[in-house]
Amino acid sequence: MKLSKQQQMRRLMEKCRQGTLQMFADIDYNTLSAQPHPDFSPIGWHLGHIGYTEALWLLEKCAGMPPLFPEKRQFWAADGLSKEQRRQLPSLPEILEYLELVRSKVFFYLETAPIEEQERLWWFILQHESQHCETIALVLAMQELANNPQLPIASQKPGFSTTKPDLLSDSEALEIPAGEFSMGCDSVWGMDNERSLHRVYLETYFIEPYPVTCVQYYRFMEAGGYGDRRWWSPEGWEWLQANPVDRPLYWREDLARSQHPVCGVSWYEAEAYCNFVGKRLPTEAEWEKAASWEPATGTKRTYPWGETGPDNNKCNCDRAFIGTTAVGAFPDGASPYGCQELLGNVWEWTAS
């Protein structure tokens, strides 16, 4: 029996929420309210904000219901309080009770909602929760790295050498021939910053098949890259003087992770590294063409490997692995041009 659009959406929302709640299964209040980095809110705030946003758009804006807890609006709204002030959280059971109340009313409304007219909004709510889940996972990882003194750190004995061959991540760059491709997205589930689908022409360019690895980035560090003004743009050098660092955030020298993608780097650090190796960051258009364009058919793929959804044979997703995985671990997830690691594992910088 074919499911209605309401039934399909309910199943998708239930699956997403199950993944969200799994991350809070063993969370204490200190973890719930901790702020390991000033740029990020506590994970408990993200959880409550998910419910608030769902209630705001689906219950208030669409169903015409009054606000559930108007006195809490300032706390859970994205523009209500500073990230530091968001640490004064209710208990986890209270937040979960709020989410359950919102969700029960949302599903009741969904039964009669004009889904054809509102479908894009429902998809936005689903995407919004998924995005905050990514951020929650990142903040939890930052807490673990900041609070685990047993992990080796860069000031201790180095765990890998730059003289060892870097077979995977020193592979030759891939050539992306000149031509037009379709950029963006017109699908109902696409975000507003992806709209609309349009044609873009790019000249021939080259792109690395994998993200920059820890051992590759270590060469930049070992060569004194953080102290060499040649590699930094004026804005980047100004940032470095204001933030006197000499390594990525939570840097670890660990032989087992030498082939993992480097992470914890700012845009300016990524730019400086590219200058050091005589390359540059790809533009958003260049990255998207390498990730999604099928030159043989002149069509755009939903995912680098095709139309089937992500799974752990194609990418590091759904928190199935502890942290990052080595580059080259998912050859089945390659794009038509041969690029890998374009989905999952780490977030990536572009020039634009």
Image (cartoon, rainbow, N blue to C red):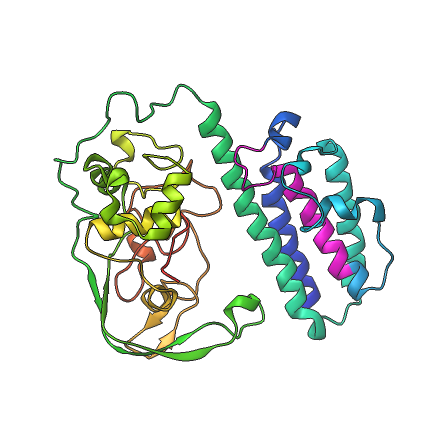
- Which one is in front, 116 or 86? 86
Residue at image point 27% right, 58% down: 280
- Residue 23 vs 185, above or below: the answer is above
| Rendered location of residue 39, percent (x, y) | 54, 42
Total numbered labels placed on residues in the image: 0
Rendered location of residue 267, percent (x, y): 38, 50
Which quadrant, please, contains the N terminus?
bottom right
Prevailing SS of the magenta stretch? helix
Does residue 2 show up? no
Quadrant where the image shows the C terminus: bottom left
Q: Residue at horizontal 52%, vertical 47%?
A: 134
The magenta-colored residue range is 35-58
Determine the image quadrant of residue 85. top right
**Front one among 28 and 26:** 28
| Relative side of 88 to 328, left or right | right
Quadrant housing residue 203: bottom left
In the rendered image, the vertical position of residue 288 relative to residue 148, given as above or below: below
The image quadrant that residue 81 belongs to is top right
Q: Is residue 53 magenta?
A: yes
Is residue 130 on the magenta stretch? no
Residue 154 position, x and y percent, is 30, 27
